[in-house]
Image (cartoon, rainbow, N blue to C red):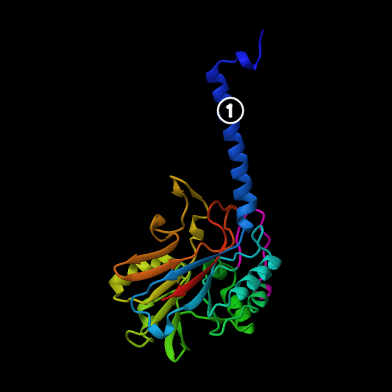
């Protein structure tokens, strides 16, 4: 007489393991290919910066990067919702770290710079909205993107400086040119800032941070995107693909090296493959102290 009760225990165990693996694989695929890529979160972080002026303690900065509008799940309507979500947090300052458009992503639909800029123009912050451009923006048309942003009140910084003031204390936002497609001289850009002034350095790719010791420069905080946090993070295996010469060293989060501070956001959209796993799209809301 045959039946499950007569199946050898080892065979039953292997069958359950196989079924469990298939179920976990299906759930993981649904999460990474559908749920997570559209699951926007606000990641709140407090950063203790040794040279940040006391009058500016508590400054709230929203850092947004790698929107890649036109990638699956991130169309103009989704961008509008992101802007509303950011405004609801009432940041003092909004910084945009590049890559607003797409190139060669499965399932993507190209969106021009003008409608993207129009929706980003609705971002609100008392100290303003500042941006740098990324490699995807220049691969499309960087000058067109810069003009579109300017038309909607977004200041694009490229090797240039903005002086801001809050509660009677001033600080500076410096934007560098994209490291992959443009000429950039971080030391020259920071030379326009008074010595020892509080400085936020906005860049697209974080790898430039590694050059600062040799250049003898030390902005108070460097802010970057580009890596997408790897888009996929697997327990035990980590971030499998990070577009950086330094692997996971600058992949995501708050990095401190030799007293220099860097924060890298995981960004919003996707590139190449429309997949995210345990690396959700984020607005990084940073409180500086």
Residue drawn at (47%, 52%) of the image:
241
- Residue 52 lies in quadrant: bottom left
Classify mark 1: residues with Cα within 10 Å, few (<14), some (14-19) or many (20+).
few
Residue 122: x and y in percent read 65, 78
The residue positioned 43% from the left and 45% from the top of the image is 236
Question: Does residue 255 sit above or below 21 in this rendering?
Answer: below
Q: Is residue 103 magenta?
A: yes
Q: Quadrant of residue 150?
A: bottom right
Closer to the camera in the image, 100 or 238: 238
Q: Is residue 200 magenta?
A: no
Q: Position of residue 215 (x, y in %)?
A: 30, 74
What type of secondary structure mainly makes up the magenta span? loop
Instruction: Pick the quarter of the image with the C terminus.
Output: bottom left
Between 66 and 29, the one nearer to me in the picture? 29
Residues 70 and 16: in front is 16
Q: Secondary structure at mark 1?
A: helix
Residue with the mark numbered 1: 16
Q: Does 210 appear above or below 33?
A: below
Which residue, as the protein is rendered here, is positioned at the far right?
77
- Which residue is depicted at the point 28% across and 71% down? 214
- Estimate the x, y position of residue 269 in percent, counting from the top left: 59, 61
Segment colored magenta = 101-115
What is the residue that sits farthest to the top in this orientation? 1
In this orientation, which residue lies closer to the viewer: 210 or 46? 46
Image: 21 above or below 11: below
Where residue 148 sits, quadrant-wise, is bottom right
Give the residue at the far front of this rendering.
5
Relative horizontal placement of residue 268, taking residue 158 as reference (left or right): right
The quadrant of the image that shows the N terminus is top right
Residue 68 drawn at (x, y percent): 60, 64
Question: As drawn, is 258 to the left or to the right of 180?
Answer: left
Q: Which residue lies most toward the bottom here?
A: 168
């Amino acid at each position: 007489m045959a039946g499950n009760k007569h199946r050898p225990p080892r065979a039953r165990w292997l069958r359950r393991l196989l079924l469990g693996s298939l179920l976990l694989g299906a759930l993981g695929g649904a999460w990474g290919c559908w749920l997570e890529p559209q699951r926007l979160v606000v990641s709140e972080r407090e950063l203790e910066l040794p040279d940040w002026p006391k009058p500016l303690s508590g400054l709230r900065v929203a850092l947004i990067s790698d929107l890649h509008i036109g990638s699956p799940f991130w169309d103009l309507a989704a961008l509008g919702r992101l802007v509303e979500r950011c405004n609801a947090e009432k940041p003092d300052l909004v910084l945009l770290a590049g890559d607003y458009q797409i190139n060669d992503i499965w399932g993507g639909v190209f969106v021009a710079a003008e409608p993207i800029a129009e929706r980003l123009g609705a971002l609100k912050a008392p100290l303003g909205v500042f941006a740098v451009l990324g490699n995807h923006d220049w691969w499309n048309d960087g000058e067109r993107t810069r003009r579109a942003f300017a038309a909607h009140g977004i200041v694009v910084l490229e090797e240039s400086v903005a002086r801001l003031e809050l509660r009677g204390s001033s600080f500076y936002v410096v934007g560098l040119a994209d490291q992959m497609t443009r000429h950039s001289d971080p030391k020259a850009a920071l030379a326009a800032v008074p010595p020892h002034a509080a400085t936020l350095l906005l860049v697209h790719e974080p790898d430039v941070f590694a050059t600062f010791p040799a250049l003898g420069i030390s902005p108070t905080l460097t802010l970057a995107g580009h890596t997408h946090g790897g888009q996929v993070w697997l327990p035990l295996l980590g971030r499998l693909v990070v577009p950086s010469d330094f692997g996971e060293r600058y992949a995501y989060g708050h990095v401190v090296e030799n007293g220099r501070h860097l924060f890298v956001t995981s960004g919003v959209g996707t590139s190449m493959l429309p997949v995210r796993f345990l690396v959700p799209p984020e607005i990084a809301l940073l409180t500086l102290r």
